[in-house]
Image: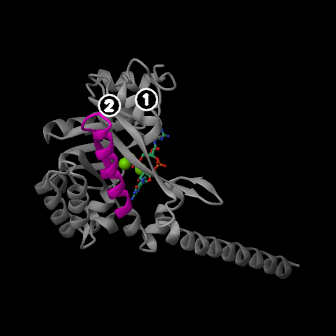
Amino acid sequence: HAKKSGGKRHQFFTRKLTEHARERFIMEADLRHAVERNEFVLYYQPKVDLITGKSRSMEALIRWQHPVKGFTLPGNFIGIAEETGLLTLISKWTIRTVCRQLRQWKQQGVGLLSVAINLSATFFQQADFEETIESALYETGVPPECLELELTEATLMSDPEKVLASMAAMKALGVQLSIDDFGMGYSCLNYLKKLPIDKLKIDQSFIHNIAYDTDNMAVVRAIMSIGRSMQLKVIAEGVENASQLAWLQAEGSEEAQGFYFSRPLSASRLTPLLKQEANYLHNPRGRLRLRE
Ligand code: C2E
Ligand code: MG
Ligand code: MG
Ligand code: MG
């Protein structure tokens, strides 16, 4: 009997594995065509200046409009895209699209904004990485200062020498650099000091319980203090409610981002809010409405 059920379990696992492999295989095939079929779309999430309540910068977040599965978040495909090398193509599309959007916003009269792009380690280490950024800026006439690159601590640690060289090249161009999900990795402060970065983004896991979790309060205060002493800007991500915002404001936080202010929006939904210079402090979540 034991043998029989073991066999069944074996069958079960094999079937699961096969299904998993099959799904990956299909996903990979789908991803391969997604760029040429124009299935990706960028959403933009405002970063809010806590002094003025306005937003002049956003973060681009990729979504995949899958022909069968529908609206798909990056957590479901970025990993596979990276493993299969397809993320290079996707990243190039993202950089071009962001620069074109910046140019379009300028043409639409909302002025110069800045947009942050999330970049993965593999792409940052690519030989033609710098050229990709430069030509996208050149093609669109977007000033380098309007582009920000978000890198994770894992990216920084993966090939420190190459990464440092790429970062130096970006700084020389005038592109801004941030460390995303800061506090989640193991970057040592001595190394951090040597990097030409402008900004730390405090990981949202620390913000989640910030109004009542004293450990998280200590971590966030420490990051803010590192920022002040290293002359780095600090932004809190994942702000979802008024008490988290109140705590951050009381600590002197200057910039924040999160569902409390706005979810990531398509460019067509964001543009009218930019035109009316929405105030995110006076009109938090869900209350930002377009003026008639
Ligand atoms: P991230 O760069 O740390 O982006 C923040 C994520 O948190 C986004 O999820 C955003 O929608 C979500 N978020 C923002 N505010 C809140 C909040 O108040 N509460 C909660 N619970 N979540 C919030 P998303 O768009 O699913 O992206 C997940 C991750 O995928 C990103 O994390 C980033 O690492 C990666 N990613 C997104 N777009 C790209 C891209 O174009 N290229 C690459 N390489 N990675 C990307
Ligand atoms: Mg990010
Ligand atoms: Mg993050
Ligand atoms: Mg993240």
In the image, residue 104 lies in the stretch drawn in magenta: yes
Write the start and end of the magenta stretch as one range: 92-117
Front-lying residue, 18 or 55 = 55
**Residue 261, disc:** 1
Mark 1–mark 2 contact, CB under 8 Å? Answer: yes
Q: In which quarter of the image is residue 53?
A: top left
Report, in whole angstroms, how far the alpha carbon at label 1 lies from the one at label 2: 10 Å
Q: Residue sitting at 56 percent across and 74 percent down? A: 29
Q: Nearer the viewer, residue 237 or 87?
A: 87
Residue 62 lies within the magenta run: no
Q: Residue type at mark 1?
A: Phe
Q: Is mark 1 within 8 Å of ligand 1?
A: no
Visible residue check, residue 208:
no
Secondary structure mainly formed by the magenta segment: helix
Q: How crowded is mark 1: few (under 14 residues within 10 Å), some or many (20 or more)?
A: many
Query: Which label number is shown at residue 55?
Result: 2
* Mark toward the viewer: 1 or 2: 2
Please indicate whether residue 271 sits to the left or right of residue 223 in the image.
Answer: right
Q: Residue 181, percent across and down?
A: 36, 48
